Amino acid sequence: MPFRRSVIGGLLLALLLSFLVAPAPSAQAASDRRVSASVVRKTVDPGAAITVKAKVSGFTRTPIVRLQERREGRWVTVKRLTRTSKHHYRTTLTRKTAGVASFRVLAYEWRSGKRKVERRSLIRKVRVRAVTTLTASQSATETTGKRILVEGRVSPALPGARMTLQRKTGARWVDVQSVKPDAGGRFSLRLWPGEGAAVFRVSRAAQDRSTRAVSGWIRARGVEPSVCVQPLAGDAELRQSLRDRLARSSEHPVVIVGAGSSTTSGSGASQEMNRWLNRFAAALSADFDLSGNLPAPVLRQDAFGWSEPRETSGIHVVNVGVGGATSESYLLRGSPETRLSRVAGLAPDIVVHFVGSNDYRKSRDPVADYTPDLRRSIEELDGLLEGGEKPIHVLVHAYRPMRPTGLPFPWAAYRDAMAQVAAEDPERRVSIDLSKWFTDAGATASDPWNLIRGDLVHPTDAGHEALDGLIRRALDLNRDC
């Protein structure tokens, strides 16, 4: 009996100790309560939906879940989240003011004795973009090349933003060019509409801090660039001297030599009659040949088959262009006694030097290489004509080749070098700069008039036609102007 009492007493004591040592149910449950929150998009446009999701677990009762926002240093309850499953909640809201909004999710339940037990999520931030305003309009039409000037302004002007000019092509908008606005958000773009009517707009992509922006439509109609805007080259006395030499064609043969590289040779033209030198010859024969004879065909001279064009009166044009030639080789290829002597043997009245693009593409120094080679070609040719009348030298600087890119010397440096060589003898040398006309016509940009072939180097038929008209205009030999 005493033994039974001692066993029962021990059991009661153990049970009492277990109640004293075991944690309270509420404290154990509290350690399992968890709240996490997320936002679907961290950057939104003003007025766009901000979706907040939450996962809540560990509460003994269904908790109340609310969304709080940080405002002026205080957390303010803004919405109650809707339960979508056992542990998941969500809500949506909007904000129109640009800036960063901070949110958190609060979940709580009431315990016995009106004791509130709550848990909070980590802070989640959402950036609301600033509303971008973008205006653009056609400001003017430039005379040269009929370029259209588009000016506009974007606000806010954020660093790194680029304004993109787009052209409507069917149902799509195709990027044409882009530019960075200044610190005040102002920008300007020049465009070449091309043939017929065209629709443009200016767009700026959305950024973290500002919305996407698109201007209104800009309607423009292209006007084909005229060769007659090309400035006259040289002085009036030299241009008159050219006319006097052409006038001799009534009784004597007048020989014009076209020297240069592949463009002079005729690359890019679909057929021989479309080459700029052939067009040049045909136009001069029609306007200035007083012999009464049929126009003489352009003689194509190379290393073999050189022939003497001076057989009858009239204007005779000889093409001695060499593909790939530089100022070092276009006349001085091989030994000077062979090539230069053959050119000198033609006793030319006018020599057109169309060279420089391959010097540029091969990164030949415009001062150390191009200038002395061009000068030497002219001087050595004149030296071989010591006993006769020396020719008038026409030096042509055309458009910038667009391939390859990243070259060390600017294209304008070769223009300046050519002008310097021409200025050394202004009575018999004249330089013609065609680069501005081609730039103004968009040839080195979107090329709306299809002046340059896909190789970005050689002219198309339209480009050859422009070269002929521009050279004749610069020499005041184009009667269409």
Image (tube, rainbow, N blue to C red):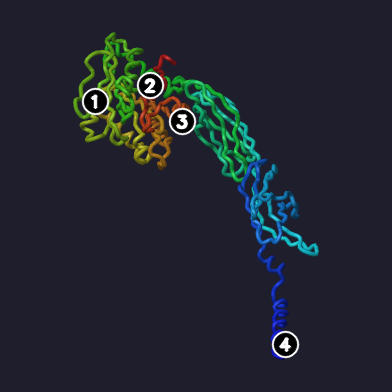
x, y percent for residue 475 = 40, 21
Q: Quadrant of the C terminus?
A: top left
Amino acid type at mark 1: Gln
User: Would you identify the image quadrant in which residue 104 lies?
Assistant: bottom right
Q: Return the residue at label 2.
A: 465
Q: Earlier in the sequence, mark 3 or mark 4?
A: 4
Please, which residue is most extreme toward the left here?
305
Residue 13 drawn above or below residue 177: below
Residue at the spot 66% in from the left edge and 64% down from the top edge:
32
Q: Amino acid at mark 3?
A: Ser
Q: Amino acid at mark 4?
A: Arg
**Screen quadrant of the N terminus:** bottom right
Lower position in the chain sequence, tag 1 or tag 2: 1
Q: Residue furthest bottom?
A: 2
Asked whether the viewer can see residue 378, the reply is no
Sequence-wise first label, 2 or 4: 4
Q: Which mark is residue 301?
A: 1
Mark 1, mark 2: which one is toward the viewer? 2
Q: CA distance from mark 1 to mark 3?
A: 35 Å
Q: Are marks 3 and 4 in contact (CB under 8 Å)?
A: no
Lower position in the chain sequence, tag 4 or tag 1: 4
